[in-house]
Image (cartoon, coloured by chain):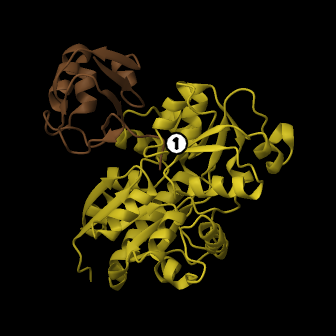
């Protein structure tokens, strides 16, 4: 099972902070999958305004603590992911 | 005459940095005819690494990581200020603050044995806190550095840390979400500490009109944060629509010391970091860095010749 934490900027869109999900595949596929559960508000935040399939550059995704940046890694299904939109400064 | 028609600018999520206003309002494009490419970073040290790779022309960051970069050969120089005193220490229940203990030393003694969440090693927050630990001889404190400050409230929520150190925005998040409270406010830590400034690639110093044009916009946005926080907050919320206005205003009021100038107090406070950075092993004591390698005040002196507003 994936463990997914939603922090600043995204937990409000999802309505919770932690989700466990049976999923294997790419991170971009996971974003689409989550869009089915969390709808328009999720899509508005996670995808770029001008290109609905491109990730919003303000959405940060850590997989097992590593910032994936612009990559789209394959998930084996047992990782811990953290999604957030930075607000706390540097 | 502006020869450069595009600028690569590194910025942080810190919501009182003028980057959010200038970017959202398109001031560079409209005012200077310059195309801006903005890149978001998690911490100042990460941005310095990007400068060293030649990937940035301008950047918004705290002075200690910039000084570390300059000492190691990064072609950087500080051309303007932005904000001072942007570091706050918070604690969960059970810790006494400055009001109860009366002195910083006494508050820090109470941290013995605690776990502290701080942004990246070499960030201004990290250097200020490690200086406290050295000065008040509290070696039993365990510092945990985070690549993104947003992970600190998450760690506090999971009881992985007892204390948090970071920006006013981090402070408001930790108070709202984790029930932490401020035990050492910004004003008690390091007077006039340069929470952020504008750093430029050295080769850009030949572009005086471009830099002064940018600094005019930067100063205008600093003034907006200081004189019209409600108006500034509205623009920040447009730029970062996942924030709510009340949160932004609360953050802006924690340490409202916004100005673009580089007064002596700002520069002296920066230089006081040098011996601390030497003790922490970032700088070589045998090769003391000169003030002129850190600051170039020519442009901001033209743009902001009067007294500072910090």
Tell me the quarter of the picture where residue B193 sits: bottom right
Q: Position of residue B98 (x, y in %)?
A: 80, 42
Q: Chain of mark 1?
A: B
Residue at horizontal 57%, vertical 67%?
B281
Query: Whole-percent x and y of residue B116?
Result: 61, 40
Colour used to depict chain B in the structure image: yellow
**For residue A26, what is the image quadrant?**
top left
Q: Is residue A33 left or right of residue A20?
A: left
Vertical comparison of B37 with B284: above or below:
above
Residue that badge 1 annotates:
B230
Q: Colour of chain A?
A: brown
Q: Nearer the viewer, residue B169 or B220?
A: B169
Q: Residue extending furthest front?
A: B140
Along the line of sight, which residue is nearer the eye, B34 or B275?
Answer: B275
* Residue B296 in view here: no
Q: Is residue B257 left or right of residue B299?
A: right
Please provide percent x and percent y for residue B42.
Answer: 40, 49
- As displayed, is residue B24 above or below residue A72? below
SS class of the residue under badge 1?
Answer: helix
Q: Quadrant of the C terminus of chain B?
A: bottom right
Tell how many labels.
Answer: 1
Residue in the picture at 33% in, 41% down: A66
Q: For residue A39, say whether it is visible.
A: yes
Q: Quadrant of the N terminus of chain B?
A: bottom left
């Amino acid at each position: 099972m994936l463990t997914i934490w939603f922090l600043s900027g995204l937990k409000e869109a999802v309505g919770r902070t932690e989700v466990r999900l049976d999923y294997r595949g790419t991170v971009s596929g996971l974003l689409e999958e989550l869009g089915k559960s969390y709808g328009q508000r999720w899509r508005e935040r996670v995808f770029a305004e001008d290109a609905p399939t491109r990730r919003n550059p303000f959405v940060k995704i850590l997989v097992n603590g590593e910032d994936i940046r612009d990559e789209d890694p394959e998930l084996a299904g047992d990782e811990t992911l953290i999604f957030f939109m930075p607000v706390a400064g540097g | 005459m502006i020869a450069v028609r595009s600028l690569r600018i590194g910025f942080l999520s810190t919501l009182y940095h003028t980057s959010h206003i200038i970017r959202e309002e398109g001031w560079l494009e409209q005012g200077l005819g310059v195309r801006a490419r903005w890149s978001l970073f998690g911490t100042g040290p990460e941005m310095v690494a990007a400068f060293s790779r030649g990937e940035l022309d301008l950047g918004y960051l705290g002075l200690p990581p910039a000084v570390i970069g300059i000492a190691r050969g990064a072609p950087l120089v500080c051309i303007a200020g932005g904000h001072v005193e942007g570091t706050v220490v918070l604690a969960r229940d059970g810790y006494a603050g400055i009001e109860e203990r009366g002195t910083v030393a006494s508050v820090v003694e109470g941290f013995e044995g605690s776990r502290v969440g701080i942004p990246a090693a070499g960030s201004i927050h990290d250097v200020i806190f490690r200086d406290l630990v050295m000065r008040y001889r509290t070696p039993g404190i365990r510092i945990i550095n985070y690549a993104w400050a947003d992970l600190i409230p998450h760690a506090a929520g999971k009881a992985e840390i007892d204390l948090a150190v970071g920006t006013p925005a981090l402070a408001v998040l930790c108070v709202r979400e984790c029930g932490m409270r401020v035990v050492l406010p910004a004003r008690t830590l390091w007077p006039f500490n340069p929470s952020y400034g504008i750093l430029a690639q050295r080769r850009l110093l030949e572009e005086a009109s471009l830099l002064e044009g940018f600094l005019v916009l930067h100063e205008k946005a600093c003034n907006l944060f200081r004189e019209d926080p409600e108006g500034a907050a509205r623009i920040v919320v447009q730029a970062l629509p996942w924030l709510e206005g009340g949160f932004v205003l609360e953050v802006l009021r924690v340490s409202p010391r916004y100005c673009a100038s580089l007064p002596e107090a700002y520069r002296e406070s920066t230089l006081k970091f040098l011996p601390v950075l030497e003790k922490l092993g970032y700088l070589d004591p045998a090769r003391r860095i000169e003030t002129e390698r850190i600051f170039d005040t020519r442009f901001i002196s033209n743009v902001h010749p009067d007294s500072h507003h910090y």
